[in-house]
Amino acid sequence: MKVAVDAMGGDKAPHEIVKGSILAAQQFQDSEILLVGDGKAIQRELESYRTIPKNITTHHASQVVGMEDPATYSIRQKTNSSITQTVGLVAKGEAVAAVSAGNTGAVVAAATLHLRTLKGVRRPGIAAPFPTRSGVCLVIDVGANIACKPIHLFQYGVMSTIFSKCIFGVKDPRVGLLNIGEEDAKGNDLAKETFALLSHSQLNFVGNIEGREIFDGKADIIVCEGFVGNVMLKFAEGLATGILSTIKAEAMKSFWSKLGLFLCKPAIAPLKAKTDFAEYGGAPLLGVNGVCIICHGRSDSKAILNAIRVALQLSKNKVNEHIVSELEKADASASIVM
Amino acid sequence: MKVAVDAMGGDKAPHEIVKGSILAAQQFQDSEILLVGDGKAIQRELESYRTIPKNITTHHASQVVGMEDPATYSIRQKTNSSITQTVGLVAKGEAVAAVSAGNTGAVVAAATLHLRTLKGVRRPGIAAPFPTRSGVCLVIDVGANIACKPIHLFQYGVMSTIFSKCIFGVKDPRVGLLNIGEEDAKGNDLAKETFALLSHSQLNFVGNIEGREIFDGKADIIVCEGFVGNVMLKFAEGLATGILSTIKAEAMKSFWSKLGLFLCKPAIAPLKAKTDFAEYGGAPLLGVNGVCIICHGRSDSKAILNAIRVALQLSKNKVNEHIVSELEKADASASIVM
């Protein structure tokens, strides 16, 4: 199985991307890693290793999409970008999966354009892992689709249930609907209509989930529209980083609190590990015809290694085939009104 | 000036509400506090004090709205509830302001129904203080209005600018629009159209604000639709509480980390104070014809005291009159297309 990795995407590219890809090539020897990007830059990185695994190859792409480039611009003006080429290899069947830590909007646009959606899927959605008190939950969508309809949210529930089973090994994932109250009839029209679809489905729907219940781990999957999910994801990141840096800065002001912080480290470590996005290896763009993993812009080699692992698992477990057949079943079910 | 306080609202009612009201009555001796609720219960509380300030009186209301009661039910079935009566006193001109830590939905419904909106205001919005690295910012709306139009968000910007100036003393509040990217053309239709309105206005509009920039304090005011604001507010609360309790639980497992946590306390204190909602005394429901402060369900006497202080400041500074005249000016401005 071949995985195409965007070597130029992310703040730490190409160094950490190449490093993570080498680790993956060593760990998954029956697979092949295609490093996509500036041939010379990749070569320079590779040369710094004593031995280069045989199952790693380079695919040249002359352009790079900037982190701030608008998605439409990247699609129209940078047709030979590492993102477009990475996704293109999957579209052409030369790789089974694409992994990129580059501009999320550009990856979504390229994947939607070149891979198209799976049969029956209305809109792709990004399923991002959020840490909880007891583990992790998936929030879908975090920004692929900001014009959501109830049917999109319903399909997110179906797709991420399959993902959660296959990748996280959750037996019967609890699906919650992000809402502003617990009662059934709460929320805007989108929430109310989605509630009706989910409660008549075969999914393990646990009802509305309020913002404050996410960290409590009341659901394994939380569906929401992309605008809300995106705001929440970034807000959580800003808040967590902000809280920790503020405490650290304050602690540095005195010897005793500095010592205190040092002694606290073992208590903070489990939480830190839990909130480390690198552990989860990125977020899958579910619903496109091919595997596409979107990594955090700050991804290091560990995150890339884990993303490649998830990409291979998705392919091996035929998650996309399962999605198509589950959506067919849901379509056939009389209770689902599209 | 008379302030009506819902003595039965919130998890710690009536004890902490009565305590906070007594503190306020002592501090603001030229004002009067009307304690609204079960006369006997309030009397019992008052009797536990050696002296009761003369500027505190009781107004009986036989019913209590539960924290989980749907807003419509509370309006229709509990017409003699402490919430309805508290707001009703303002509607009848017997008090200038209403303060409640009760069911937020019920307070919003009662205030919208009985006070009506100010001249020119399309929809009221709740402006909630969010802690930032450097202080505080106001997020409006956090749940009063979940069917937002661009003009509503624009008016939120106008109303909270006046509030921020009068209550927080911010000279020229920076208004940001919550969005999923920094570039002008980002977001859903609501965000794009609101961006246009705000950028052609007289407000100190600083552009789009992403979720991760909120804690950085990039804006003094962040406008967003009520669904997103509500989810974010509750998510932040759950996350902050969750992070701290997780660290605490971990720290308790060993002597050294327990000691570390103890030594860290002074470093955590400033952050704790900043995130203490009681400091800000609740969130105003801006846009209704009267002053209405919505307090956190867990409000203690300090929160109630501060909420009464804010309520009095809003009345004394004639914030509502300013809102009406500013909106008239905005209406007159040719650049604003409603």
Image: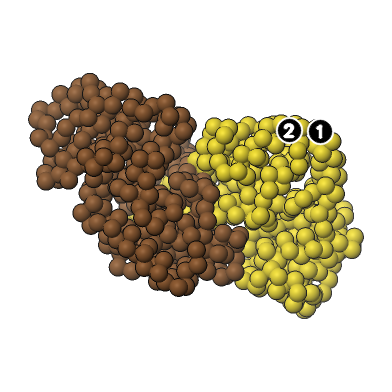
Chain colours: A brown, B yellow
Q: Position of residue A83 (x, y in %)?
A: 34, 33
| Residue placed most toward the observer, B84 or B157 | B157
N-term mark: 1 or 2: 2
Q: Quadrant of residue A35?
A: top left
Relative to residue B292, is residue A304 depicted above or below?
above
Relative to residue B179, is residue B305 depicted above or below?
below
**Residue B333 circle label:** 1
Q: Quadrant of residue B8?
A: bottom right
**Residue B292 circle label:** none
Label 1 amino acid? Answer: Ser
Q: Can the viewer see residue A181 in this picture?
A: no
Q: Quadrant of the N terminus of chain A?
A: top left
Name the residue at the right extreme: B93
Instruction: Return the chain for callout 1.
Output: B
Residue at x 74%, y 77% (from the top left corner):
B77
User: What is the C-alpha distance between the residues marked 1 and 2?
Assistant: 8 Å
Residue at x 80%, y 32% (from the top left corner):
B334
Residue where numbered disc 2 is placed: B201
Q: Can the viewer see residue B93 in this picture?
A: yes
Assess whether mark 2 and mark 1 are in contact (beta carbons under 8 angstroms).
yes
Label 2 amino acid? Answer: Ser
Q: Position of residue A268 (x, y in %)?
A: 36, 49
The secondary structure type at the circle numbered 2 is loop
Q: Position of residue B205 (x, y in %)?
A: 67, 33
Q: Is residue B150 left or right of residue A40?
A: right
